[in-house]
Amino acid sequence: MVKRSVIVSSAVLALVLVAAGCGGGKKNTSTAPSGGGAKGGTLLTLANDAFSGSPDPQVNYTLQEWQLLIMTHDGLVAFKRVSGPGGTKLVPDLAESIPKPTNGGKTWTFKLRSGIKFSNGQALTGNDVKATFERIFKIGDSPNAGSWYNGIVGGDACVKTPKTCSLSQGIVVNGSTIAFHLTKGDPEFLDKLAMPFAFILPASTPTKNVSIPPPGTGPYKWAQYAPSKQARLTRNTFFKEWSKDAQPAGNPDEIVQKFGLTPTAEVTQVENGQADWMFDPVPSDRQGEISTKYASQVHINPLTETEYFALNTRVPPFNNLKARQAVNYATDRNALVKIFGGPKLATPTCQVLPPNFPGYKPYCPYTKNAGSGKWTAPDMAKAKQLVAASGTKGARVKVNTLTTDPQKSWGNYFVSLLNQLGYKATLQALSPSLQYPYVQNSSHKVPFAWSDWYQDYPAASDFLNILLGCGSFHPNSNSSPNIAEFCDKGIQAKMDNALKLGITDQTAANDLWAEVDKEVTDQAPWVALMNTKYLNFVSKRVKGFQFSPQWYFMLDQASVK
Amino acid sequence: MAEFAYEPEPEVRLAAGEQIQDIAGKSPWRLAGRRLLRNRIAIGSLVLFVLIVAVSFAAPLYAHHLAHTDAFNSNVSGTTVVNGKRVDVIQQGSGKLGLGETPIGATWHWNYLFGADAQGRDVMARVLYGGRASLEIGIGSALICCAIALVLAMIAGFFRGWTDSILSRLMDLIWAFPVYLLAIALATVLLTKENGLQWGPIHVDPSSLWVPTMIIAVVYVPYVYRPVRGQVLSAREKEYVEAAISQGASNLRLMFSEILPNVLSTVIVLLPLMIATTVLTEAALSFLGIGVKDPKASWGTIINDGQGLLYTRPLVAIVPGIMIVLTVLSLNVLGDGVRDALDPRAKVRVGK
Amino acid sequence: MGAFIIRRLIGLVVVLFFISVLTFLIFFATPGVDPSRQLAGRNPSHDTVLAIKHEFGLDRPLPIRYALMMKRLFISRDLVSYGNQALKVVPAITSATPVTFSLVIGAAVLWVFFSILLGLLAVVFKGTVIDPLLMILALIGISMPVFWLGEMANLLTQDRLHNTFLFSWVPPLGYTPLTQNPWQWFLHLLIPWITLSVLYVGFYARVLRGNLLDIQSEDYVRTARAKGLSPRRVLLKHMLRTSLITFVSLFGLDFGVLVGGGALLTEVVFGLPGVGKLTYDSLVNLDLPVIMATVLYGAFFITIMSALVDILYARLDPRIRPA
């Protein structure tokens, strides 16, 4: 997914994501007992804005809402609710166990657990499951209906005629047995079932966008969602814990997220103990303060995300491979990390996949003394050589970025750099609400644009295929995530192979993905900048902070009493 | 009763310390000039203002010869010498966790006098360079605004009726206009068009300072218009104006000779105050993308930059703020002096 | 008077109409703006965007979209934000209004009181050191950007000096309705009131001082003095009224803007959920429905204040007839 939902609105806010071991980080890598803390109290969290877009669980694509939805709803399977690498594994949630697919990977048969109730007292049945998936199509604006869930038999037809969607062929319900039939094998099908789009809702949920998430099966329920005020979750009295790994009981009695304060005001409130946690990044001029006076309340965790500038491979001057490689060699990634907040908060990278991700093998050719896979220093001499060889010197380049920091400062850095290399560069800073659709549209011919990507789920294709696959480039559309407009037939064939291989042998597939990552990096459609870390700041009274690699701070596993 | 009989205003007014011989036979403008020159406080503030302007124009000299710093290029990884030691311009936090990158603070030497900003650039050098843009936009837009507002207010207040209604509703429209939306839209348009906009004969160059100047000037016209119109309405009702109209005096002559002097004083008070407002509005517009763009500077953009450093390097926002205060202060005092020179309200009256 | 009211009401409707059309056109003239893409949220598939475009009537011609929006805003009042579909625009504005009113009216009381006081003091003490001193204070106030001043206030009262006796009474940022807890309402608003009024006191004090000095030697002032009235009575009863014309003109303009959501940055910095904050968020997110609603809301108050000020002129200077 793209950057997190918070649109930075203050004049200068540094996006600071820090990944380093937090105080006591070593303890968090094991499966710490969940829900082991004291129960009760209200966990008060702060966020600058409400979650953007519709709050409907099958539409909303923001981490901000997802962090709350995992506590109120469940899917057939779930990412294990622990911190550390264990949190990327899938465990059965509403299903009793994770089946092996049959029929050449096209059929998945689940047995639904019994005795589970929604927060309105209704019992969960197989019907609810089928209705949930049909609703993904029926509501018409679920973002991934046509890309993730159309593999279910009948899905493509549903995309075309959503109102009359029927998945009776694709999802066969037999009492508590539910069989999913796909049109072809999909190694990522289970991941997609674990995402909030596929969290099970009551069959009676209306088939248009709701203004507050409907009843769910999780330990909490949505009591209030007022976008200019707050969101409030209270305990679901019908919840009985059935799997600590998938959906542990929560500690606080109530979880509130108040909207409307600036991030710097949020820092002050957490410092004063007037709030427990802030969703937004800590502004850079407060970081020193919290790391000296409140160090024990700071947790720094790695993220699986990449910051990059896309080089448009179809528009001069960067339709020339040498020019693209030149910029990669010239970029001083340390300076960019410094702008971001320093080496504790981000690590330079040259490649697409982030560390600790399936298919990741460290690779960095664009540095002095290449070979170790780590970036160490820029190579300006080589860069200038390549620019001369490319014949693109003197070309005009618009550096497209956000109007907010650190992206704006990164943009300024690149304007300077490109001018040094002999180009004629100018800054084109757009407001966050405009920039992302703007740079995706090929008719704007943007040669050099900032973007970032956070994982949806742990699969290499989520980065490589979505951002650099031929099928992700839609000309003249505001919705074309392949910003670099990159399409290499040979590399695409390898990606397709890897996807196919994943059905049977994910390990071998990941090796193939690592090769894809390497080959793509050599083609330099991006200047990859860094992988950032998440800086979490909690109040003094918060105990049991746990950070899942999938959902980040697990709010209900902390305790405030 | 004889004691309350109307007494005509004496033709002549004297400033403190003047004798009737001093002013005999001299034109009003020359008189005003003389009075101004003798007002030491006003001259002092004029000198201060000229100093501010001079120093802003001397920015390149400062940057190259005194400070030896670059005010425009990013210097994130750079180093400099402070007290004989070489240090990073932007330093990593020293706390247990080593978080936060903070630019150096004031060195109180020519090199990074007031410290560096988040890009590692010399604040003082930028403040000096920024003076040019702020003074141009700030003073330019204030002057244009007051001129337009004065003319329109005189027309509206003098002729009243439909003229007044239409002009005043137009002013309401301008005052209620979503300027920030226009700024965002215009900024985006200018950004995405290669060579600026073409509206008939008018060519809008994206980096021209005329864009923010004109926008700010027009936006504040209602603010000067309304009080001046009020004064015009008030002055128009004076007995001698009615008398002059009944005698057949032409409108234009009346507006200039009777109305204008009365309202000019209000405009002179408003003008320097408006400069503070226009400079700050320029900061907001630059933030939205209209006007001074990175890496160029204006006092407003430096204040914007300073917002993100408030808790660690507050000087970055304070120094340009002080420049604004000094400019506005000097112009206000000068304005007072000019008003006094044009029409001194002395306690001394000739003949009484 | 009746004719005056009718004239101004027509003027109000005309202004609102033009403003709404201009806002609409400016929004859609912005390159890169795509409401259907906005509504589709993050990372929608291409077909989703097209489906939304059709469902929300965004593929119809501009005048029809304008008419639809006006209908949803005024008649059926179910206009929904583009950026957040759970946000209904009209209820959001009505619940934000009391907050803005509380902030602006309180600040206005403060700034009117103090600027008249300072203006009078500057005139009475003209020639001594007090006059320039007051002037310097006043000018410092108007040269400070509101965002900076507010953040500085927070830095001191919420952070650095929060635990001292000076500011420990300052509640956390936010708003408490008057009806819920009047004392907390007051405490929450005190620092914002002071911050907002500091920006205006200087301007108004200078203007008042200027006007008072101007009319010192007017006929009616000399008449009053000749009648034997004390200087203070002359000052307060006779001079102040006519010298308030400029003061009142400016006040009408500033108050109208502020009450109409112009105190954006003050509300943002102090976490007050008023119309200003709504305006600010809508501009950041380029959220047309909310932009349109806040712009019209603001235009309404501005035009009303303009009419009220014209009526006030007639009271201050009986020679002036209402326009």
Image: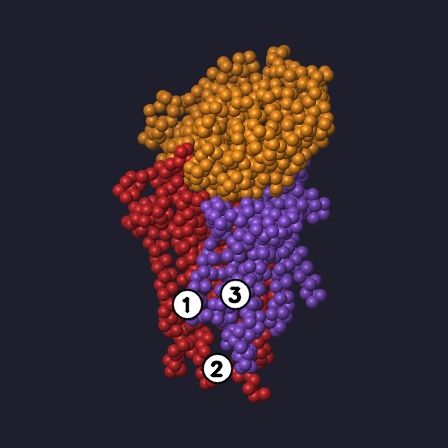
Letter of the chain that mark 1 sits on in the rendering = C
- Residue C16 location, quadrant: bottom right
Is the residue marked by circle 1 packed among few (<14), some (14-19), or many (20+) residues within 10 Å?
A: few
Query: In the figure, the orange chain has which letter?
Result: A
Label 1 element class = loop
Q: In this view, does C308 lie above or below B259?
A: above
- Chain ID for label 2? B
Residue B168's place in the image compared with C188, above or below, is below
* Lateral position of residue A344 relative to residue B220, left or right: left
For numbered disc 3, what is the local secondary structure? helix
Residue B100, horizontal then vertical, whole percent: 42, 37
The disc labelled 3 sits on which kind of residue?
Answer: Leu
Residue nearest the observer in this picture, C26 or A313: C26
Residue type, label 1:
Val
Q: Give the amino acid at mark 2.
A: Pro
Image spot of residue A375 (x, y percent): 38, 27
User: Disc 3 to disc 2, how far (Cα)?
Assistant: 32 Å
Residue at the spot 53% in from the left edge and 79% down from the top edge? C225
Which residue of the protein is positioned furthest toward the top in this rendering? Answer: A103
The answer to whether residue A241 of the structure is visible from this angle is yes
The residue wearing badge 1 is: C129
Q: Disc 2 marks which residue?
A: B10
Q: At 45% from the left edge and 83% from the top edge, which residue is drawn?
A: B350
- Disc 3: which residue: C117
| Dots 1 and 2 on the same chain | no
In the figure, the shade used to draw chain C is purple
Q: Distance between the residues labelled 3 and 1?
A: 17 Å
Quadrant containing the N terminus of chain B is: bottom right
